[in-house]
Image (tube, rainbow, N blue to C red):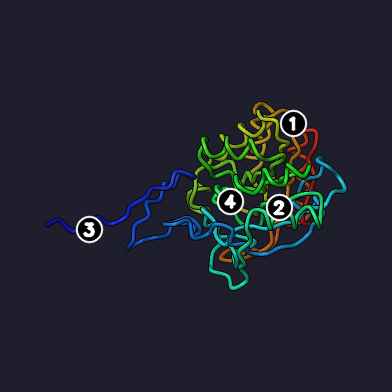
Amino acid sequence: MGGVTERREQCHICPHECVFTEKHPLGRCRVRGLDNPGYGMCVGLAVDPIEKKPLINFHRGATVLSTGPNGCNLTCLNCQNWHISQQKSTMVQYMSPAELANLAMEKSDGLAFTYTEPTIWYEYIMDTAPLVKEQNGIVIMVSNGYVNKNPLQDLISVTDAWNIDLKAWSNDFYRKICGGDLQTVKNSIEMVAASHCHLEVTWLLIPGHNDDPHQITDAAKWIKAATGENTTLHVSRYFPRYRMSIPATPISMLNEAVALFRKHLRNVYPGNI
């Protein structure tokens, strides 16, 4: 008689393409796995100004209920929210799609999936976002852009605005610092830019890692060509977090980077000052 076949499922949300088994039931993000254990498990609930996402040229003055999953598909050494993205949190509560959508519309103008990496919450967002939009609310994604094209297209269809991190103009940086790749993020930025969704991009400026003037210039030229010179770009100041202890970005360096980006883009704003 043959033995019982072990359950085996493969995830296709991001390029990691994790395989879940009974012996290894979770993916690298610790949210996706057998029986989708992270579905609806919210870490953090707060009403924020939309500008804090950051989105500065979309529904200015609006507020959004912010939440996210307890995990991430990247492992950035400088993660600003590492305590909820890189480790299990005790501050997690389940909310059904209807509960979250209704709370968002009761307390604010819409819903922001943020804090960690929302695209790994694919099914939950696909169930929840339409309920917000039915009540004329806005739905925002704050993402690292590390997502495959098919699920991204689905997520675009139920959302209104995205802020995507462009962490560096170096695949080596993505591989060593983040555990991802640059091309996937570029693809995501292009797809959102070509859609009905509003797009803003964030570049977290880290001394010695992504502050090279030539790389900044190349990134600025690509953004202009790929998404247009009016694309909003936030150049944010880095602070030491998680496993990266180099000193915070000097204000002078931040201003220099902003000036370089502004040679090619019209809407460039310094952040985290």
**Residue position for label 4:** 124
Q: Which residue is at a point 75% across and 58% down the rendered structure image?
A: 103
**Residue position for label 1:** 264
**Residue position for label 3:** 4
**Residue position for label 2:** 101
Left or right of 88 on screen, residue 102 = right
Residue 88 at what x, y percent from top left?
A: 54, 69
Please tell me in which quadrant of the rendered image residue 189 appears.
top right
Spatial CA span between label 2 and label 1: 39 Å
Spatial CA span between label 3 and label 2: 41 Å
Where is the N terminus found, in terms of image quarters? bottom left
Mark 1 or 4, nearer chain start: 4
- The one nearer the camera, 244 or 137, is 137
Mark 2 or 4, nearer chain start: 2
Residue type pointed to by label 3: Val
Spatial CA span between label 2 and label 4: 11 Å
Residue 63 at what x, y percent from top left?
A: 82, 52
* Local secondary structure at mark 3: loop
- The one nearer the camera, 1 or 14, is 1
